[in-house]
Amino acid sequence: MKTSIFDFSILKDATFRFGLIILTVSMAVFVFTEEQVIDPFRDDMPFSFFLNYGLFLTYLFMLFVDNRVKHGGIFRFRSLRKNIPLLLLFNVSAYSLNRFIPVFQDSTEWLQGLLISLNLAMVAFCFRPRPLKMDGLNLGILIFLSLGFVLQVYQAFYLIPFYAISGMVFWAFGFSLHSFVAIWFVITLFKMIRQYVRVADFYRWVALGAMATPLVMFVAFGLKWNEINQVIEQNYYAKHAVRAKQILPDWVKVSQQLDNNWITKRALKSELVYTVLEREWGGEMFFPRNSFGNNMNERLQHDPFVALTPLVFGKINLDAQEKFKLYQATFNARHQTEERLWSGDHLVTSDIVTTVQLFPEHRIAYTESIFTIKNNYLETNSWRNRNNQEAIYSFYLPDGAVVTSASLWVEGEERKSFLTTRSKADSAYKAIVGVERRDPLLLHWQEGNRISVRIFPCTPTEDRMFKIGITTPLHFENKKLTYTNIDFEGPNWAKAKESIHVISEGEINHFKSSLGLKSSDDGWTYFGKYHSKWDITIDAPPLAYSTFSFNGRSFRVQDYLPLTEKFLPENIYLDINSSWSKRQCNQIWKAAKDKKVFVFDGKIKEVTAENHKKLFGKLRQKRFSLFPFYEIKNVEQSLVVTQGGQFTPALSDIKKSLFAKNTSIFLTENKTPIRVYNLGEDLTIYLKTLRELKVFNFQKGNVKELLQQWSDKRFPKYPTNPNLVSIPYSNIQIETVGGEQKLNNAPDHLLRLFAYNDMMKKIGRSYFNQEYITEQLIGQAKEAYVVTPISSMIVLETQKDYDRFGIEEAKNSLKNASIGESGSVPEPHEWLLIILCMVTMLFLRFRRV
């Protein structure tokens, strides 16, 4: 006779059946109220807790009656299977209360999975045929019960500091007794596991193995944690060692040596995001601890490994600021660690409307994207005023691209941005958001051509909308032009919908899109789920001869004609890090034996036949490198060979260091562009910023192409003509000439791109010392209306706000870019002629009347 997997005869018991029903109701209430964000320590308890606690008390009362009838006393809980729903109901009630008084912060994903599996295993245990037998399902149940047993022992240990106070105030409706739910779990799980162990010795070993698994994992986690601590202590706390003058901050050297894996991430987030247990009162007691001002825009989380490890293996002995810098550099978390005036943890990006205007004959595109931000925070009477939240976005621009417009919708009306200096925009935003709490938008340029956008306030009662416009060169390769979607980070966009409309100023041939855009009457369209990675490829037509004229100057686009010069390096500097392969090192070393080869290992060292293996091996262990270009002795005869590697600190992160000071002096005094060859396509933030600032004669390729250049004794040379900017990304150069030309219908984006790239070149050598901030450069930014290291865009609520902070609307300027606007803007004398003609026409018309 075939045995059924489950024995449903237990459902004949009315008490158990009722317990299972209200357990289902209780769990449903808990799950469906999860989106209702609860403010910790508010002055009224949430309805979901009272409902779940009431369901627990209802079943408890029924068990009292059942116990008295069947076992002769209300406290004789003899039926393990009937007690399990009671325990699970109390557990759901405890987690509902935890939303109001957060003893445990939000569980990490793996912990949530284990807790759900434990609850399911306990329910399944109730329906297994008795007596228990050896089979696969019982084996699985036993494994999860054993894992859950270890977890509940940990949670019971975690709650030790709360037992005394809970025992003293239990008379207050029994709320504090929820602290003891973990102990109840330990007792119940022990009884359940014991039933399995009595069936067969095999189950005993399964249970012990399952219990040992998390302990072994904890030890492995702790040993790795200890390695991280040792790296930190070796660099931070070698106070008695004789040290040379410090060039870079300690956290930079630590970041070079840390692996960017999930354990390092949790270690650096300990106390900032993850709760930890710390010894107090001379080590005799411990308490959970975390920082409520973590500034990482993440909810506080609970991971048992992270919480317990500092108690056993020692805490990460760094203050919050140092952890913050380390985390930012190790995981490229610049967006996540942006300074915040208000939280943004309940915001989502709900809709994106993107319009792309292509100018194929000029190899330019203009993209406008309108973002809708939704605040999912449902509580509206919180004393902590968490309703108002701040949205922060980061946009990652391709080479040579620039932001040329921004808007914020205020009371349903689009308010276009004003362009002003970075310092004025910062002052206005912080005053209005930090103190007055009214409507602004702030847009800044950041290193690595990242754009940060801040919007405030985002409230649950109204969705916020903002627009950003970006002028980008189209990538040219093999007679094809490629437009790549501009990626961003910001409030969660996992469920965002996007509408895309692509139009073109000029004929398009062989249009291909990785997103499958559909052809329409006026272009190509898409509507559906947001995708961050997509592109468009078209044939590259011949460049147009038309110009754009403004303020007495004209701008036109030309084919980029790469210039080369005779060059054979005498000195080769290898910027080696973990991204270099052993083969690359050996190939270049073999080809450069007749030259002087140097590397940087704390100081510049010459590579020889005796030390090259040791030096290369040591440097390849560093996760990234920051090459000190100021150490180059003979720039004219030197070449730096580098490779992108992983994330590096930005120049602004180390601006107070001796490294930055030396670099600033060197770049200011050095008049010869540094020749840099990058192996591959990727660049670190450090190198990308220096390249954008035009301090390099830059070339990229592979080792084979590099060796061929040495053989040919040639190297690229950038034009020095002040009326010309080169954009190799699009294989174009933009030239400015005096006066207005005949064919005058090119897009105004020519001026905008010229101004941005020209300004970056002028800023380049003075970037560190702020001497680049001149009225001439500010005027150039305002004329072209472009965001640069010195110019930002801002939207304020009223004209009085602009007047108060001295922010004036740019005069004689292109203003905010927009879709459909191209061609020449009338000169002042042309405006006068137009006005005179209109006045004359009106005069003649009214004279006839």
Image (spheres, rainbow, N blue to C red):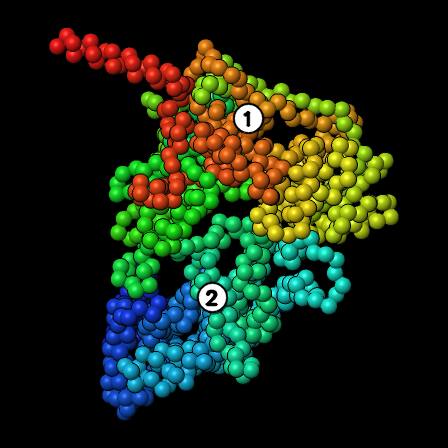
User: Which amino acid does the dot numbered 2 rest on?
Assistant: Ser
Q: Would residue 531 be seen by someone viewing this image from the given angle?
A: no
Please give the name of the residue rendered at 67% of the width and 42% of the height, measured from the top-left corner: 665
Q: Quadrant of residue 52?
A: bottom left
- Vertical order, 247 against 707 (above or below): below
Q: Is residue 834 left or right of residue 561?
A: left
Q: Quadrant of the C terminus?
A: top left
Residue 730 tag number: 1
**CA separation in Å, label 2 and label 1:** 47 Å
Q: Is residue 368 above or below residue 612?
A: above
520 or 385, nearer to the observer = 385
Mark 2, Cα crowd under 10 Å, few <14 / some 14-19 / many 20+, is: some
The residue furthest top is 848
For label 1, the crowd category at 10 Å Cα-Cα, with few meaning under 14, some 14 to 19 and many 20 or more, is: many
Please report the residue visible at 42 percent of the width from the left and 70 percent of the height from the top: 104
Identity of the residue furthest to the left in this view: 849
Q: Residue at x 53, y 67 (%)?
A: 306
- For the N terminus, the quadrant is bottom left
**Disc sitting over residue 291 in the figure:** 2
User: Of 185 and 32, which appears nearest the observer?
Assistant: 32
- Which dot marks residue 4? none
User: What is the x, y in percent for residue 345?
Assistant: 39, 56
In which quadrant of the rendered view does residue 687 lie? top right
Q: Nearer the viewer, residue 225 or 28?
A: 225
Mark 2 element type: loop
Pinpoint residue 736: horizontal percent, then vertical percent.
53, 20
Question: In terms of sequence position, does the residue under pointer 2 or pointer 1 come before the other?
Answer: 2
Drawn side of residue 66 relative to residue 694, left or right: left
